[in-house]
Amino acid sequence: MIALRADWRSAVVGAAVANLGAGMILPTLITWAIGTLPYRMRGNGTGLWMAASFLGQFLSPLAVYGLRTATGTLSRAILVYALACGLCGLAALIARLRPTAVPAPDEGAPPINRCC
């Protein structure tokens, strides 16, 4: 919406829609991600999540600025950025849904000691 229309009204509506979606999905994703960790690692998991989030917030404007320089306009830069994010999300979904082969256990191999 922001990329396809150049007026400020559509940018405000697009930003509202994007932030509404982010406001609904982020608590769900954080709960899901942290809930998969053992209790003793949840503090580290929360810290890593927040670090990744803040790093993305820092790098996103730099990426859009670089794309604006490459594409010529801010609207095209946002469109390219949105398409790239959509493709990355689709690739992550495909990778998540693809069945993985479970290796057969070795008969004579010692058990793996996992501490974490």
Image (cartoon, helix red, strand yellow):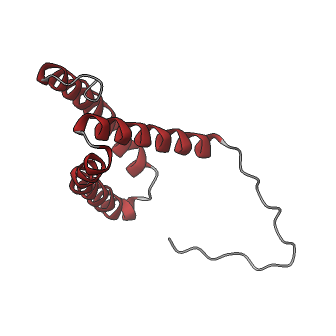
Q: Residue at x 36, y 60 (%)?
A: 45
Residue closest to the eye, 51 or 31:
51
Q: Residue at x 76, y 53 (%)?
A: 101
- Name above or below for residue 28 compared with residue 66: above
Residue 112 rendering spot, x and y as whole percentages: 67, 75
Left or right of 33 in this view: 56:
left
Residue 107 rendering spot, x and y as whole percentages: 87, 73
Q: Quadrant of the N terminus?
A: top left
Residue closest to the eye, 46 or 81:
81
Q: Residue at x 23, y 39 (%)?
A: 74
- Name above or below for residue 43 compared with residue 92: below
Tell me which corner region of the image, top left, top right, bottom left or bottom right, holds residue 24.
top left
Residue closest to the eye, 38 or 72:
72
Left or right of 16 in this view: 33:
right
Which residue is at the far right?
107
- Name above or below for residue 84 compared with residue 49: above
Left or right of 111 in this view: 89:
left
Residue 115 rendering spot, x and y as whole percentages: 53, 75
Which residue is at the far left?
8
Tell me which corner region of the image, top left, top right, bottom left or bottom right, holds residue 38.
bottom left
Q: Residue at x 35, y 42 (%)?
A: 81
User: In this figure, what is the number of numbered marks?
Assistant: 0
Residue closest to the eye, 25 or 115:
25
Residue 97 rendering spot, x and y as whole percentages: 63, 40
Which residue is at the far front?
72
